[in-house]
């Protein structure tokens, strides 16, 4: 009986360790530098938004996983730009990829749906 336990342990330990090592990898790009620069000068959010878009595109092109919070942050910037429908899409993506964010993303989705859309100026 003791040998069976040793044999099971001998096979289970490497499998357990391999599962621990195979953590998902994310491509953060220049997120930390971009966020730092945005906090230094919040009047210029365009470069930070571009970095968020780049992180999402890179993950999609490489079949990687978008890091946690990126879709939500991008959606927040879209919401601030009165692009509610696009923001909802990003919040839904965050919720799908990171189910633990469901409660917050549902609140953000309600907020985005309640945000009035800016009228387009007519060209007459």
Image (tube, helix red, strand yellow):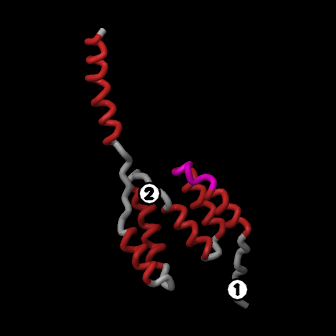
Residue at 40%, 52% in the rendered image: 64
**Foreground residue among 44 and 123:** 44
Report, in whole angstroms, how far the alpha carbon at label 2 lies from the one at label 1. Answer: 37 Å
Q: Name the residue carrying label 2.
A: 67
Q: Which quarter of the rendered picture does the C terminus lie within? A: bottom right
- Above or below residue 97? Residue 48 is below
Q: Name the residue carrying label 1.
A: 121
Q: Position of residue 10 (x, y in %)?
A: 26, 23
Q: Is residue 24 magenta?
A: no
Q: Residue furthest top?
A: 1
Q: Which quarter of the rendered picture does the N terminus lie within? A: top left
Residue at 56%, 72% in the rendered image: 77
Q: Which residues are magenta?
A: 98-103
- Above or below residue 114? Residue 38 is below
SS label for mark 2: loop
**Foreground residue among 57 and 74:** 74
Q: Position of residue 117 (x, y in %)?
A: 71, 74
Q: Position of residue 120 (x, y in %)?
A: 70, 81
Q: Main secondary structure of the magenta part?
A: helix
SS label for mark 1: loop
Quarter occupied by residue 40: bottom left
Residue at 42%, 67% in the rendered image: 54
Crowd class of label 2 (few under 14; some 14 to 19; many from 20; radius 10 Å):
some
Which mark identifies residue 1? none
Q: Residue furthest bottom?
A: 124
Q: Is residue 117 left or right of residue 32?
A: right
Crowd class of label 1 (few under 14; some 14 to 19; many from 20; radius 10 Å):
few
Quarter occupied by residue 20: top left
């Amino acid at each position: 009986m003791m040998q069976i336990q040793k044999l099971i342990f001998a096979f289970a330990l490497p499998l357990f360790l391999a599962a621990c090592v195979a953590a998902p990898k994310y491509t953060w790009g220049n997120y930390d530098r971009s966020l730092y620069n945005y906090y230094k000068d919040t009047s210029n959010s365009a470069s930070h938004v571009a970095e968020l878009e780049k992180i999402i595109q890179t993950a999609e092109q490489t079949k990687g996983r978008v890091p946690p919070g990126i879709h939500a942050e991008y959606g927040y910037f879209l919401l601030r730009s009165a692009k509610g429908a696009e923001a909802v899409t990003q919040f839904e993506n965050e919720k799908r990829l990171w189910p633990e964010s469901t409660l917050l993303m549902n609140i953000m989705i309600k907020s985005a749906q309640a945000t009035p859309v800016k009228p387009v100026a007519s060209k007459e």
